[in-house]
Structures are given as structure tokens and as C-alpha cells.
Amino acid sequence: MKPVMVVVLVDALGWTLAGREPGFAPALPERRALATVLGFSTGALPTAFTGRTSSEHGRWLMYARARGHGVFRGFGALRLLPRRVRESARLTRLLDRLVAGRGVHGYFNLYEVPRGELPAFDLPERDDIFKPGGLPCDSIWDALERRGVPWRGWNWRTPEAEARAQALAELSGGRLDFLFLYSAVLDARLHHEGSHGAGVRASVSEWSAWFDAAAAAAARAGREPWLYLCSDHGMVDVRVTVDVMARIDALPFRRGRDYLAFYDSTMARFWWRDPAAREAIRNALAAEPRGRWLSREDLEREGAAFADARFGDDVFLLEPGALLLPSFMGHAPVAAMHGYDPSHPDMAGILAANRPLPAGVTHLAHLRPFLERELDAALGAGTRRVGAAS
Ligand SMILES: [Zn+2]
């Protein structure tokens, strides 16, 4: 039987979360923790798909500093609107459409980034990262195209239930050699409910059972199912909120004039204009016990050091379980968060399969080369591979 590869990436499915579910994914007996990267899915997914670090592929966090005119050019005038209008859902919908119309085909969210401050920033993800040519460097999707592999992928653009059903139909049809499914449903439920939520448990057991259905569908088409479940990071339950912005706003320096700042859920990032502001802010946050300034060495070790400081001259990171509140992501607390030090046990993702997992595959960056070696084996086991260019 010629194998068919089925790769499912469930965003935020942590190793500890999966381990808590009795009888999790019986179709996938080989399993282990997969170490993640510092940051969020905007950097982690490109690492999974390219096998490279953020500083190599250029993607780390959703918002970077604008160089020249970014996608938010002209948005500065929004600061003149009355606050009620500026913070309205209606204006956000309008701005969403405007940004998409300016050529942003990737995932973005304006969250609660102050509308008038948007022109200082830009969205590095412009293309569909789940497609060939969608990333700044060679990805697994480019490799599939080059090799002429019949494949199909689903991502957040398709509702999860539809994607699952379509994938099962494709498997029964037997036409494809490689299927890829990405879902962000569990990630959203985890943020909302925390790791012990009912919706979270339902999501984990649905995926657990789906692999049995996938194996059966492949077998109906006379194909041997090679099944893989992976994730880009785990999730940490929020224990405490930290008002970083209050500490900064109490200082005699003004955002936008003396420094630029971007407040993610777990990080505060700064670009300095006035050295006095830098010194005062660095001292003020050094007094915050629930976080620390990342050194150049920290960022280099995490593969997130950028020579042009596009993601910040200095980055302050909260400890696992602490949530920056308010932040540019929102003013309402969430139950769980990621984007912490990758060494925290709940931050690790998972790799599970019904195939042997080589000892060296332990980190998210190992996923792409591992899957390509599996593809070699799968194609070698069936027909000859077509036109491998590299
Ligand atoms: Zn998330």
C-alpha cells in the first residue's frame, strides 16, 4: 500500500495538556514534547514550516516597526476622532478592510492597538504562509511543489469542522499523497477557558478521535496512513496580571515623542528616541518582579536577535503565567496565554505519530526536515519521486 501522509498542526496543543487526557490519540503511539520558540504563532509557524529561526526567516511578532511607509500610512489622523468612534467595532471593521485592501493577505488583528499610533508599525506577514512562496525563505510547501507531490492544505481560512470533513473525503478518494490541516480553535478556547475548560477538553478529544477516522478513510482508498499530530507551542494558565503601562506612564516621558512602545500580551517592546527615557524606563521595569529585560544574548539564544531592531531595541518579558494588562492586545484578562520563556514545561508543543520518531527530533525547527525525510520514505515506498530540484 502506498503511504499517504496526514499532518495536523493544532495550535497551542501542549505536551502537558495532551498528557492529561486519558487515552489520548490511540492511533498515534509514538509521541514526545516538542520544544517551542520565544514569541507567538506569527514566528513559530514560519519556524515549523521552514526549519529556521525567527532571525533567519524574518518573522517574529505580529507587529514590527514600520520602515518608510507601512500598511498603516495615514492612520495617524485617526487620533483626531472622538474616543468613542476611535475605539468602535465599526471603525475596526472598516480599518480591517482597508488593511486587507493594501495587500495584507496574511493573518492580522488590530486588537486594541491605539489607532493613531498604528503608522509607527507594520505587519510583516503579507502573504499566505500556508502556501508555496508565502514565506521569505524556502518552506515545506515550496518543497512539495518542487517535487510535484499531490497535496492539499487547510488552515484558519476554513472552519475546522469543514476542513476535517473535506480532509476525510480526500483521504477516501485516495488522490493525494500529503494532507495538512491547521486549526486555531483550541488556541482560542484555551485563551478563553484556561487549560481545564470544557471546550478545551472537547477539542482535545475530538482531534484524538479524528485520527481513527483518518486512518479508516485512508484504508478505504487502499493507502497506508502515516499520521502526524504536532503543535507550535503550549499554553500557560494565567495566575496574575501586571500593569506595565502604568509604571511607564507615570514617568515624565511621552510615548511617540521620547520613545515608541508596543505592548504585547507578555512582552513590552521599546524603540528609543531619548536616552534619558531609555534609562528611566529600564530602571522602572527592572523594579517589576514579574518580568525581566532580555539581554542581547537571550535574544540570540532564542533566534530572535535582529540587527535592525525591527521588533524592538529592548524587550521586557513577563514570567510564565503573568499577563500584561492592559496591553495593545486588550484590556480584558484572558484565562491562559503563551509567548513566555520556551523552557517552561507548559510551553512545549507535541509531536505524535504512528511512525518512529528519530531521537534528534525535539524542537519545532526539526519538524520540517523530519517531515521531508518522511516524504522521501513515503514516496520511495510507493512510486519514484518526481523532479526533486535540490
Ligand atoms: Zn494564542
Image (cartoon, rainbow, N blue to C red):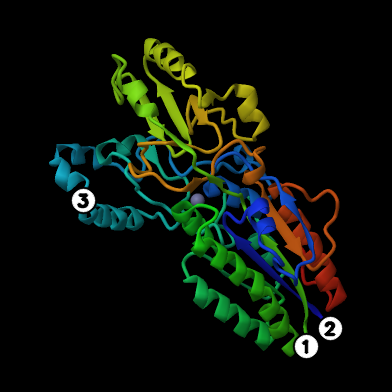
Residue 74 horizontal/vertical position (percent): 24, 41
Indicate the amino acid at tag 2.
Met
Indicate the amino acid at tag 3.
Ser
Residue 357 lies left or right of residue 11; in this view the side is right
Q: CA distance from mark 3 to mark 2?
A: 57 Å
Residue 5 horizontal/vertical position (percent): 73, 72
Answer yes or no: is residue 193 visible: yes
Q: Nearer the viewer, mark 3 or mark 2?
A: 3
Mark 1: is the Cβ under 8 angstroms from ligand 1?
Answer: no
Mark closest to the chain's N terminus, 1 or 2: 2
Q: Which residue is mark 3?
A: 88
Name the residue furthest left: 82
Residue 134 lies in quadrant: bottom right
Residue 246 lies left or right of residue 335; in this view the side is left
Q: Which residue is mark 2?
A: 1
> In front here: 107 or 386?
107
Q: Quadrant of the N terminus?
A: bottom right
- Tell me the element at label 3: loop
Whether tag 1 and tag 3 are in contact, CB under 8 A, the answer is no
Q: Quadrant of the C terminus?
A: bottom right
- Tell me the element at label 1: loop
Q: Which residue is mark 1?
A: 222
Residue 196 horizontal/vertical position (percent): 54, 55
Q: CA distance from mark 1 to mark 3?
A: 54 Å
Residue 153 horizontal/vertical position (percent): 59, 70
Mark closest to the chain's N terminus, 3 or 2: 2
